[in-house]
Image: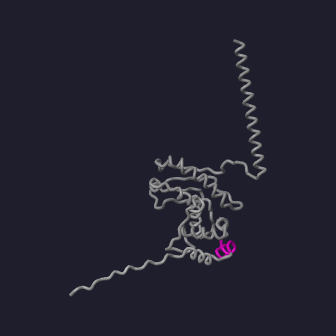
Amino acid sequence: MKTSRNASLCIRAALASAAAFFAFCGSVSAAGRHAADRHRGVPPPQAPAFKVVVDTSAAPELAEWSEKSLRPAVEHWYAEFCRRFPSRGWKPPEKITIRYKEGMKVPAYATMPGGVITLNRGRFSKTKSIGCVMHELFHIVQHYKKTPAWITEAMADYARNYVWTTKGCPMDTRNRRARSKYAVGANFIAFVESRHPGTAVKLNDVCRRGKYREDGFWPAATGKTLDELEKDWQASSPPPKPKKKRVVARGRRKS
């Protein structure tokens, strides 16, 4: 009885020693990986510096989709938007709250300060549009000061249609003005970005710092005025030819 007990104690001690040895090897290996990453200039992995809260109390039927699809998308792309559109000294909001509301006239809206995105329960119950949320999410990232409304909305649609996805926005044949909100303005910004890479990031930065001036920004960033860029943009996609009017021949009334 005593011999078996001693054997059991020896086995436990051996297992404990083995576990400690492998843990030590693992820590040495991890330290080696981090050292190699630092040597290559790769920053060490960091925990997210923000928190996403999804309140589905007003839309319990959307709880599962919100947790499995919406939250991961928001967490990933909030970090990406902040990384791709930086500003010196700017600190992104540390908390984002997504909530649902009944009886809204618009699909969604963002509230700043506070970092709150309110979604139309009725609309999202029918169409679970993450793209719509991306537009509002970029409004939180923008944090613009003294900026024309067309730039604010155009940049949010640019982030949605040219950063989150690459589908883009087609040219609207009815509205071909550069100073336009939403998809039309986003199409214009994408055109300028294709000709002058980095313009979108610069535009976001000056607007966030409240330093945007139309007569100064565009010539400095592109070498052309906004009106000149507008003409280039319009010429890049000429309007469609007008349709020929259908002439219906009418017979004379017999007397």
> Would you say residue 135 sits in the magenta stretch?
no
Q: Main secondary structure of the magenta part?
A: helix
Which residue is rendered at x = 61% and y = 52% of the image?
A: 76
Quadrant of the snapshot with the C terminus: bottom left
Question: What's the residue at 62%, 78% (across, down)?
Answer: 228
Which residue sits furthest bottom?
A: 255
Q: Is residue 137 left or right of residue 246?
A: right
- Relative horizontal placement of residue 59, taking residue 229 as reference (left or right): left
Q: Is residue 43 left or right of residue 160?
A: right
Horizontal and vertical percent for residue 218? Answer: 66, 73
Point out the residue furthest to the top here.
1
Q: Quadrant of the N terminus?
A: top right
- Spot occupied by residue 124 in the image (x, y as percentages of width and height): 47, 55
Confirm whether the magenta stretch covers residue 213.
yes
**Residue 144 to residue 237: above or below:** above
Residue 214: percent from the left, percent from the top? 64, 74
Write the residue at 58% across / 64% down. 158
> Which segment did they paint magenta?
212-222
Q: Residue at x 56, y 75 (%)?
A: 234
| Coloration of the structure image | one colour
Q: Nearer the viewer, residue 110 or 219?
A: 219
Q: In the picture, residue 244 is in which quadrant?
A: bottom left
Query: Which of the pair 3/145 is nearer the observer?
Result: 3
